[in-house]
Amino acid sequence: MQARTPALATAAAALALALTGCAAGVGIGVPIAPGVSLGVGVGSGGNVNVGIGTGVGPLGVGVGVNQRGQVSAGGGVGASVPVGGARVGAGVGASTVLHEPVQAVPAPVPPAPPMPAAGES
């Protein structure tokens, strides 16, 4: 495994660099049970998120809520390497909004013009 560690670190760094134009963030996860972690993170727009997730190997899923009350679920794949007493990694994934507390109000539809009465031109 020692020979693969630099290769994984290089791949993780390259992936992180390639994704710099995408939404990005930084966070920390704390194990609370076997295979389950509680995470806190900050996205590229300064949006604070709290979530819970689980994973097997490079695959992970989770659900979280942000400071606006928006609830999202997501899944992804990633790789990490040990650095000191922690792990540092990069990954890609997809998510969807499950609950949006602040929804845009649709614009009112203007009334249709009146129809001419029978016999009128």
Image: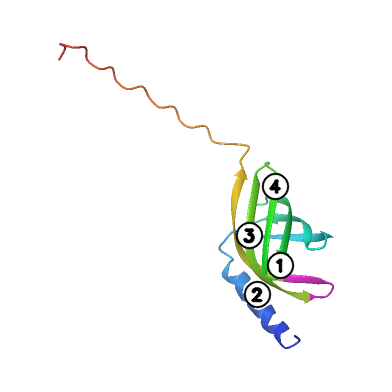
Spatial CA span between label 4 and label 2: 28 Å
Q: How crowded is mark 3: few (under 14 residues within 10 Å), some or many (20 or more)?
A: some
- Label number found at residue 56: 1
Q: Does 85 appear in magenta? A: yes
Looking at the image, which residue is at 70% across and 85% down? 4
Residue 31 vertical position relative to residue 6 in the rendered view, above or below: above
Which of the marked residues, 1 or 3, is nearer the chain's N terminus? 1
Looking at the image, which residue is at 56% across and 63% down? 21
Which of the marked residues, 1 or 2, is nearer the chain's N terminus? 2
Residue for badge 4 = 65
Spatial CA span between label 2 and label 3: 20 Å
Q: How crowded is mark 4: few (under 14 residues within 10 Å), some or many (20 or more)?
A: some
**Residue 77 place in picture, x, y as percent:** 63, 67
Looking at the image, which residue is at 76% across and 86% down? 2
Q: Which amino acid does label 4 sit on?
A: Val
Residue for badge 2 = 13
Residue for badge 3 = 75
